[in-house]
Amino acid sequence: MNLLTLIEEKIKEFETIIIHRHILPDGDAYGSQLGLKYLIQKKYPNKKVYAQGNNIEYLNFIGKMDEPVEDETYNNALVIVTDCANVERIDDQRFDQGKFLIKIDHHPDVTPYGDLSWVDTSFTSASEMVGYLAIQAKWEITQQAARTIYHGICTDSGRFYFEGTSSRTFEVAARLFETKFDFQELYNTMYSQTFEDLAAKSELISQATVSEYGVGYIIIQDQFIKKYNFKYEDSGKFSNLLKGVAGIDIWIVFSIREDGKYRVEFRSKDLQINNIAAKWGGGGHRLAAGAIIDNLEQAMEIIADANELIKGN
Ligand SMILES: [Mn+2]
């Protein structure tokens, strides 16, 4: 039996299914988690399917998390974790309390986990994997599931722009479009911003630094977050502010967290960047990675490494 059939079989077997994804969720985390939930609910209306983890306000238009389930609910449950490479980053650490654990992810398999693991870095997104699973399993795809999964593919692939976009990505997207979900409404929502957002971006751009080798970086401090009334987890939306700027080959955003540490988002035009993230205990894809560091001295070490990387190529 192939891997996808095994996953299908497990979903068929369990009456309770609990789906987790990574902390600081993005469109793909939500898309793969909720998309899978909606698909299973349509296919098996009598099963109990729960999405767990913190509810993130800016993703409410995609869907909402379920209330945290009771610990006992895990006893006879199938747990599926999507879009999360390592166990430390799984939102709600009870993920290992179920009867059977499945990992579905498109990041490099640095820390393998799960009784069953479907990891394939050739997918743009975990959402694309979930869409692909639905097609292979011949599950009915509702407009709600299609919208959710499509959003995840769009955010992780930069709307079919980033590395990894393939003919399969378009095949999955085409199948989602067949449901005739309102993609204009989705685009209008996902690409709309407030004037405050625009002002905030303009402030960050004006404070950005570009090194002589072409490393562009932005530092987001408490003051900025308070000024614009952002939440700490919102800073992810600035990851690509310096993308597509001539002369910038690597762009990095350091943003303060509630605990005083800094979240680092690395992006690169074509040089492999995830090695630098891994040096600080982070990881990710070749051209898009993340890490958490303690202070701005470490940030400067990262900039120095990025400069070296460009210099050496
Ligand atoms: Mn992803």
Image (tube, rainbow, N blue to C red):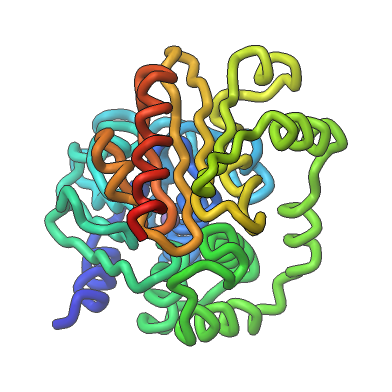
Q: Residue 2 sits in which quadrant?
A: bottom left
- x then y, percent, for residue 169: 49, 78
- Relative to 276, is 101 on the left or the right? left
Q: Can residue 34 be seen in this view?
A: no
Please name the residue shown 69% across and 29% down the image. Answer: 207
- Relative to 132, is 197 on the left or the right? right
Quadrant observed for ligand 1 in the rendered image? bottom left
| Vertical relation: 11 (above or below) 53 | below
| Viewer-nearest residue: 223 or 259 | 223
- x then y, percent, for residue 288: 43, 53
| Vertical relation: 219 (above or below) 291 | above
Please name the residue shown 65% across and 38% down the image. Answer: 58
| Viewer-nearest residue: 145 or 220 | 220
The quarter of the rendered structure image containing the C terminus is bottom left
What is the number of callouts on the image?
A: 0
The quarter of the rendered structure image containing the N terminus is bottom left
| Viewer-nearest residue: 200 or 173 | 200
- Relative to 147, is 308 on the left or the right? left
| Vertical relation: 115 (above or below) 294 | below
Q: Residue 70 sits in which quadrant?
A: top left
Please name the residue shown 75% across and 22% down the image. Answer: 228
Residue most extreme to the right: 195
| Viewer-nearest residue: 187 or 44 | 187
Please name the residue shown 54% across and 34% down the image. Answer: 55
